[in-house]
Image: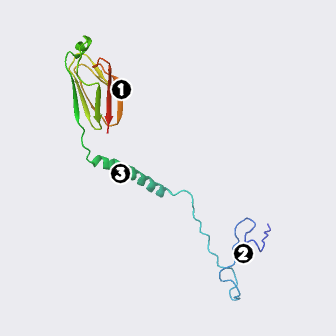
């Protein structure tokens, strides 16, 4: 195979640099240095994706950054909310069925975050207070951890409705 090289192009026929065509830093008018010029090997740096160790370090760092607020929130003292108890006395369902005005709870309840509602049903009939259904002789406890506004059915009111508000 015959290779053709031109003086204006230091590349060979295969497109690679020809080391003999690159002038050395020491070449010039000095006739004492004749021979092949000193050529430094090309250093190739891979500028692609980081290696596995770097990716692992990024992953661990990201997890630590995400975990810090969770850990801090666990140790920061947050004041407990108030506890409210609704006591449904025996005979409440019979009194409501007879048309009597039973004042067990108001038709609007306001809570703040971290408050707790305890409902004790001492009646012989199940009752519904908004999203909470309490069977006869049962007790249920509910903590409020999210801001919400609820309008729902209530078996303890003649109007059949109750509004529950949970604020900050």
Disc 2 crowd rating (10 Å Cα; few below 14, some 14-19, many 20+) is some
Q: Quadrant of the N terminus?
A: bottom right
Residue 39, quarter of picture? bottom right
State the residue position of label 3: 68
Query: In the structure shown, which secondary structural element does the residue marked by tag 3 occupy?
Result: helix
Disc 3 crowd rating (10 Å Cα; few below 14, some 14-19, many 20+) is few
Which residue is at a point 35% across and 33% down the rendered structure image?
148
Front-most of residues 45 and 85? 85
Query: In the structure shown, which secondary structural element does the residue marked by tag 2 occupy?
Result: helix
Residue 152, quarter of picture? top left
| Picture coordinates of residue 64, whole percent (x, y) | 38, 52
- Which disc is residue 21 wearing? 2
Compared across the picture, whether 15 is left or right of 84 comes to right
Q: Quadrant of the C terminus?
A: top left
Q: Examine the rendered structure and indicate whether residue 18 appears above or below residue 115.
A: below
Residue 14, quarter of picture? bottom right
| Picture coordinates of residue 73, whole percent (x, y) | 31, 47
Q: Earlier in the sequence, mark 2 or mark 3?
A: 2
Query: In the structure shown, which secondary structural element does the residue marked by tag 1 occupy?
Result: strand
State the residue position of label 1: 151
Compared across the picture, whether 68 is left or right of 45 comes to left
Which residue is at a point 41% across and 55% down the rendered structure image?
61
Estimate the spatial distance between the alpha carbons at disc 2 and disc 3, rounded to whole Å. 60 Å
Q: Examine the rendered structure and indicate whether residue 40 appears above or below residue 112.
A: below
| Picture coordinates of residue 121, whole percent (x, y) | 22, 22
Which residue is at a point 29% across and 46% down the rendered structure image?
74
| Picture coordinates of residue 26, whole percent (x, y) | 65, 83
Whether the residues at callouts 1 and 2 have beta carbons within 8 Å, the answer is no
Front-most of residues 22 and 83? 83
Front-most of residues 94 and 60? 94
């Amino acid at each position: 195979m015959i290779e053709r090289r031109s003086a204006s192009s230091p590349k060979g026929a295969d497109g690679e640099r020809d080391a003999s065509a690159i002038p050395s830093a020491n070449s010039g008018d000095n006739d004492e240095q004749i021979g092949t010029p000193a050529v430094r090997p090309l250093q190739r740096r891979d500028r692609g994706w980081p290696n596995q160790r770097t990716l692992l370090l990024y992953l661990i760092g990201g997890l630590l950054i995400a975990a810090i607020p969770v850990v801090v929130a666990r140790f920061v003292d947050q004041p407990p909310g108030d506890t409210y108890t609704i006591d449904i006395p025996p005979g409440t369902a019979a009194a409501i069925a007879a048309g009597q005005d039973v004042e067990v709870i108001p038709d609007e309840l306001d809570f703040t975050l971290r408050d707790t509602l305890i409902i004790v049903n001492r009646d012989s009939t199940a009752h519904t207070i908004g999203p909470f259904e309490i069977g006869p002789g049962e007790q249920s406890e509910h903590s409020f951890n999210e801001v919400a506004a609820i309008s729902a059915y209530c078996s303890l009111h003649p109007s059949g409705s109750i509004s529950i508000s949970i604020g900050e």
